[in-house]
Amino acid sequence: MERILTDLKQSACFLGDGVKFTLSVTMDVSDARVDWKSSRIPKELFLNKFENIKKLCNWCNVDFELNEADNCLGCVAKRRNDSIKYKNKCDLFMWLDPDMYFPMHILQVLSVAVNQIKNSCYVITPELIRYWDTSWDVITNKMFLNEPHNHRDYFDMYSINKVAQDLDAPYIEEISTMKFGGGWFTCVSHDLMQLATVPEFLGPYGLEDTWLMEYSMNHNRFSRKRAPIVQYVMRNVVVTEIGKTYIVDNHYKKFLNLKTVDMEAHKSNISKLFGQKLREHLEKTI
């Protein structure tokens, strides 16, 4: 978290006046994930560090909170909570996972994009390096289209600003489909967030990006009352997650008594409900 707040602080140096940001961060210190009584590091160490890193956020409004119960145990719960908390307080929700690497000018490009877009329901994403399969090529930067699909495994994410120097000037482009990941600097307009929501059945983690993509595509297919939901891409603004080559063990983990969570079982349960819940929500909203 400290690393990504430092990167955002650097990116903010390129901002002009106009777009205002609020940084909403939640740290889970509940007993649901960590047995603090039997851990060798006290909870207070993380509380103190969390308080201290607020100093990196003097470029924006800050909303730092601690989850000491069980209502924010993952990124999906965080996105759901903020969609409600900021329902009447913002124009755009930006989803950013703490393992992302992005170029320093991304906030500047995003600010320009927001002022250009006239639609009310939309998503803005950056581009990627090569991921998974050809379906992701629509948001892959052309420099990387000839790389293998495991490009992320060995790509040097620390070179992301060097990549930005080698690319042409950024521009905003509308694409004819919906394709994005949840925390890849994905920006969701206020109106789309309130229309699609982040439903409770998704739980604390998993498939909120799939939900939003499927909702948007089906909305555009079946709705006769509303304007289409659109995705825009910040071309030549490339982001990536950390790759396998650069993953290092979290040195805190061996001192913490972590409680295991069966994520595969959780995702399987969500998948069983997904189609029915999507149909029900579409019937209510289109």
Image (cartoon, rainbow, N blue to C red):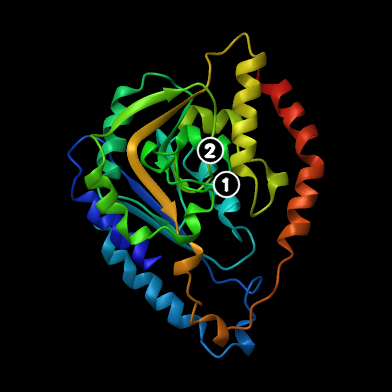
Please tell me whether mark 2 sits on a helix, a strand or a loop.
Answer: helix
Q: From where the camera sits, is residue 188 visible?
A: no
Q: Which mark is residue 136?
A: 2
Q: In 3D space, how far apart are the residues under numbered discs 2 and 1 (Cα atoms)? A: 7 Å
Residue in view at x 54 percent, y 29 percent:
178
At label 2, the amino acid type is Trp
> Residue 14: x percent and y percent?
19, 46
Q: Nearer the viewer, residue 156 or 180?
A: 156
Q: Nearer the viewer, residue 198 or 2?
A: 2
In the figure, 61 relative to 196: above or below? below
Q: Position of residue 174 (x, y in %)?
A: 42, 23
Is any part of residue 258 visible from this angle? yes
45 left or right, relative to 32: left
Q: Position of residue 234 (x, y in %)?
A: 35, 34
Residue at (64% x, 78% y) in the render: 258
Q: Residues within 10 Å of mark 1 (few under 14, many from 20)?
A: few
Please tell me how crowded label 2 is: few (under 14), some (14-19), or many (20+) other residues with Cα within 10 Å: some
Report the amino acid beneath label 1.
Trp
Q: Where is residue 285 drawn, in percent x and y?
A: 66, 22
Could you tell me how many numbered marks the image carries?
2
In the image, residue 173 above or below residue 160: above
* Residue pictured at 50% horizontal, 77% vertical: 250
Q: Which residue is mark 1?
A: 132
Q: Label 1 near label 2: C-beta < 8 Å?
A: yes
